Image (cartoon, rainbow, N blue to C red):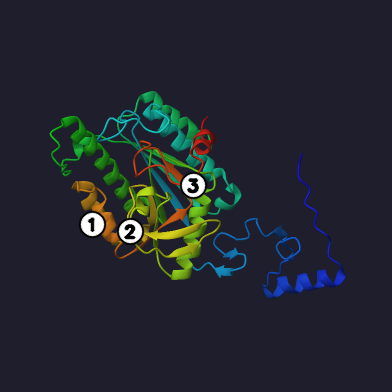
Amino acid sequence: MKKIENIKKPNFLKKLFIKLCRIIGFEIIDQSNLYIPTSDKLANKNLSKLGVNSISIPLGEIKITRPVKSLDLIIKTCTSVNLVTQNKRRVFEKEKSEYTFRTINSVINSLNFNKDVLKKIKIKIFIVDFNSKKEDKEKIKNKLAAENLDFEIIDLNIDKFNQIKTLNKNNPIIENNMKATMASILTSFKIAKEKSEDLVYFIEDDYIHKKESIFEIISSYEKISSQLDKELFICPVDYPYLYKKLENSNIFVGNKYHWRTINECLLTFLTSKHLIEKYYAELLNMSENEHTPFETPLHKIFEKELCISPIPSLAMHCTNVNSIFGLSPNINWNKIWEDNEK
């Protein structure tokens, strides 16, 4: 049964006062029921307008001076390789293709969350694929086409990436898997530099998102970037390994989540075209020359630029359950997994 919200109608003087507040740009709130008559919303609803302002009770309004114009999502897929450097089973112990499909499903579900608002932003999806089965790629294509999304699928031929140098592991299979991963990363960075206009979200195919993820990331990017007058890196995962060190974090209030500064992340992250161009040489270095840890050049960038992650997590990284790079604390992993099955 639909819940009926009982909001008492204001009298004539209140109506007049509400109109006046709207004209002069003030928000008022009825403390008895947390109703905001100037916006005709309850205080626990989304009060912000993408690209215009961000409103948090009781912090007030932030004018958006850094609106998001476009978003390119670059998803690296490979349904044939479980884990690049190890044989451990992932959480839920499914075939690799299942994680890829649920990652795609979660991105679609997240784009459909607040869909009318996100229509104001130009959105395109790039699938950078290596060695997935033909039927798997067809399934991905059909999922995206069914939603009328703008998308492009790029098939990699790693024989064309002679510039990539992997570390010697005395294991040709692992070394080839790593080269393919690096080729996907390199291609993703080139797409971002050559084709993107504003924000770019790099996604690996074992990151399953909450439905509110993309809207929260975009709206929080606008708010925090406007507050600081600074471009950002955003990681969607609250990684458990970042809680094993004693280090300072700054905390920000985003749209509906808190965000904290971090100094490390893996290779699923969002940033701006401006920062891609600014640090393109460092990103190429990371994708052409294997480091230990792999993300070392990215972490060096974070010494100069701000990277933030949500509390709690907006996405689940489906690695092995015992990995410190995987399951984030204080989220319902089973629900995220089940919500993105179809």
Residue to which mark 1 is pinned: 281
| Residue 240, horizontal then vertical, whole percent | 38, 48
Q: Quadrant of residue 155?
A: top left
Q: What residue is drawn where x is 82% and y is 69%?
A: 15
Q: Nearer the viewer, residue 224 or 200?
A: 224
Residue 301: image location, x then y, percent: 28, 60
Q: Where is residue 174 drawn, in percent x and y?
A: 21, 33
Relative depth, front residue between 270 and 186:
270
Disc 3 vs disc 1: Cβ atoms closer than 8 Å? Answer: no
The label number, if any, that marks residue 330 in the structure image? 3
Classed neighbour count for the residue bearing mark 1: other residues with Cα under 10 Å, few (<14), some (14–19), many (≥20)? few
Which callout, 3 or 1, points at the residue further toward the start of the chain? 1
Mark 3 lies on a secondary structure that is loop
Residue density around tag 3, few if under 14, some if 14–19, many if 20 or more, within 10 Å = few
Q: Residues within 10 Å of mark 2 (few under 14, many from 20)?
A: many
Closer to us: 147 or 13: 13
Residue lying farthest to the right in this orientation = 12
Do labels 2 and 3 touch, CB within 8 Å?
no
- Count of number-bearing discs: 3
| Residue under numbered circle 2 | 263
Residue at position x 49%, y 35% in the image: 337
Seen in the picture, residue 316 relative to 219 is either above or below; the reply is: above
Answer with left or right where residue 175 lies relative to residue 42: left
Mark 2 to mark 1: distance in Å? 20 Å
Badge 3 amino acid: Asn
Which residue does the image show at 51% across and 41% down from the upper left? Answer: 332
